[in-house]
Image (cartoon, rainbow, N blue to C red):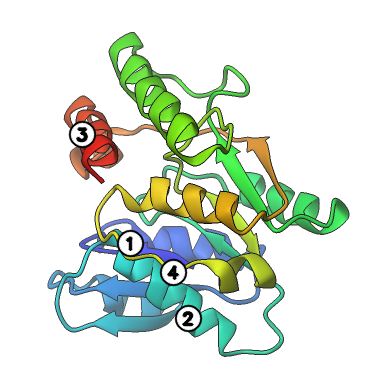
């Protein structure tokens, strides 16, 4: 499931890559006006639309609700639309979810050295992790990675109400309260000029920290 907002330039490629591994790709278009929804549909995704922009947390909740309508759904992958995640990482996380009978597998860019991060961005994201761990009791190494895999039970337990970046900490808190079975899995995040221009800049990392502290 791909939350989607103004990614017309790249979302078609992201959907096509996902469909090479996963049978069903659902994009939740969060009020885009740049042709993102049409590009996702042309690439083969099912698109659910928000009439206005509600924020990534709301898009995730809409996508989870849509996926759970199908009784055959046994797991849901959350995957960013800007091309920064790797399909092979998502597939490995799905395999691990089922092999270890887990409810949630969180992607972590800090479990190996593949992800290239400048020192200041790394420090800001680490600070957000420290706060999230202390406030939720769930001990993660990467609390704000958009690549996750949820079992059907795990998806049913989530009720995301924070619409912006604080939703990531809210998800972690709900996983802890529900005593879901979880693990972290090493993933590579691909920072490109495009993904940085769409929100993966140092400023966005600072915004994540501020929203986490205020959320």
Q: Nearer the viewer, mark 3 or mark 1?
A: 3
Q: Residue furthest right?
A: 99
Residue 199 visible in image: yes
Residue 107: give x, y in percent of width and height. Answer: 58, 41
Q: Residue at x 59, y 44 (%)?
A: 106
Mark 2 and mark 3 lie on one chain; the one further toward the N terminus is 2
Could you tell me if the residues under marks 2 and 3 are in contact, i.e. CB atoms within 8 Å? no
Q: Badge 1, how many Cα within 10 Å: few under 14, some, many 20+?
A: many
Mark 2 and mark 1 lie on one chain; the one further toward the N terminus is 1
Q: Badge 3, how many Cα within 10 Å: few under 14, some, many 20+?
A: some
Numbered label attached to residue 57: 1
Name above or below for residue 113 compared with residue 21.
above
Numbered label attached to residue 210: 3
| Residue 149 image-quadrant placement | bottom right
Judging depth in this view, the residue of 134 and 192 nearest the camera is 134
Mark 4 and mark 1 lie on one chain; the one further toward the N terminus is 1
3D distance between C-alphas at marks 4 and 1 = 10 Å
Quickly name the residue at label 4.
159
């Amino acid at each position: 499931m791909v939350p989607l907002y103004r990614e017309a330039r790249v979302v078609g490629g992201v959907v096509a890559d996902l469909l090479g591994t996963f049978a069903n790709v659902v994009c939740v278009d969060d009020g885009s006006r740049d042709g993102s929804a049409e590009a996702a549909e042309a690439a083969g995704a099912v698109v659910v639309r928000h009439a206005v922009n509600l924020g990534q947390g709301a898009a995730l909740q809409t996508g989870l609700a849509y996926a759970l309508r199908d009784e055959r759904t046994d797991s849901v992958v959350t995957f960013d639309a800007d091309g920064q995640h790797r399909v092979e990482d998502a597939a490995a996380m799905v395999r691990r979810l089922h092999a270890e009978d887990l409810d949630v597998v969180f992607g972590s860019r800090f479990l190996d050295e593949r992800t290239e991060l400048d020192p200041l961005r790394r420090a800001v994201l680490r600070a957000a992790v420290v706060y999230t761990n202390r406030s939720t009791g769930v001990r993660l190494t990467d609390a704000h990675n958009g690549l996750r895999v949820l079992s059907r039970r795990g998806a049913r337990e989530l009720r995301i109400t924070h619409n912006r970046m604080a939703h990531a900490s809210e998800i972690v808190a709900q996983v802890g309260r529900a005593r879901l079975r979880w693990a972290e899995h090493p993933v590579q995040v691909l920072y490109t000029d495009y993904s940085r221009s769409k929100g993966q800049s140092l400023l966005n990392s600072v915004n994540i920290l501020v929203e986490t502290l205020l959320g």
